[in-house]
Image (cartoon, rainbow, N blue to C red):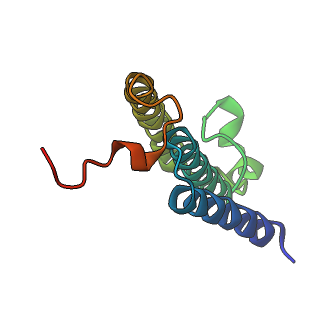
Amino acid sequence: MAPFRLLELLILGAVLAGFAGLLLRRNLFLKVLSMDVIGSAVVALFVLVGARSGLRSPILSAAANAPAAAATAWADPIPQAVILTAIVIGLSIQALLLVVITRLSRIDPGLDLASFDTGGQR
């Protein structure tokens, strides 16, 4: 089995584990943790996609003009920029959710999802 195929399967397993945790757990903290697992797996997928074309950084130097350097496989810089953006956005969303969960823990320290259901009453 090719190494990239094995890594793709491991990333798919991480996404499915996070999705299962998101659906099956009733604790709000565990739901946020599952969302973090999914986000980390997506970042890992972008890293894998960016590494398919090569592993060298696309930084040109004086030696890059040599004919041997032209045949070198370069890493794609676009997924790297997307990865940095996704990490920052994911971290800020996770921090916001943890603040909201901390405030909700004053109502129910167990953070069970059913305890916050109003049943349609306002």
Quadrant in which the N terminus is drawn = bottom right
When asked about the image quadrant of residue 6, the answer is bottom right
When asked about the image quadrant of residue 63, the answer is top right
Q: Position of residue 117 (x, y in %)?
A: 31, 49
Left or right: 62 as drawn, with respect to 78: right
Image height of 38 relative to 24, above or below:
above
Q: Position of residue 48 (x, y in %)?
A: 66, 56
Picture residue at 56% right of the left edge, 54% below the top: 25
Quadrant in which the C terminus is drawn = top left
Depth check, front residue: 24 or 11: 24
Q: Position of residue 73 (x, y in %)?
A: 70, 55
Figure label count: 0
Depth check, front residue: 19 or 27: 27
| Residue furthest to the bottom | 1
Picture residue at 49% right of the left edge, 37% below the top: 111
| Residue furthest to the right | 1
Picture residue at 44% right of the left edge, 31% below the top: 108
Picture residue at 64% right of the left edge, 31% below the top: 61
Depth check, front residue: 98 or 119: 119
Q: Position of residue 67 (x, y in %)?
A: 72, 51
Depth check, front residue: 105 or 97: 105
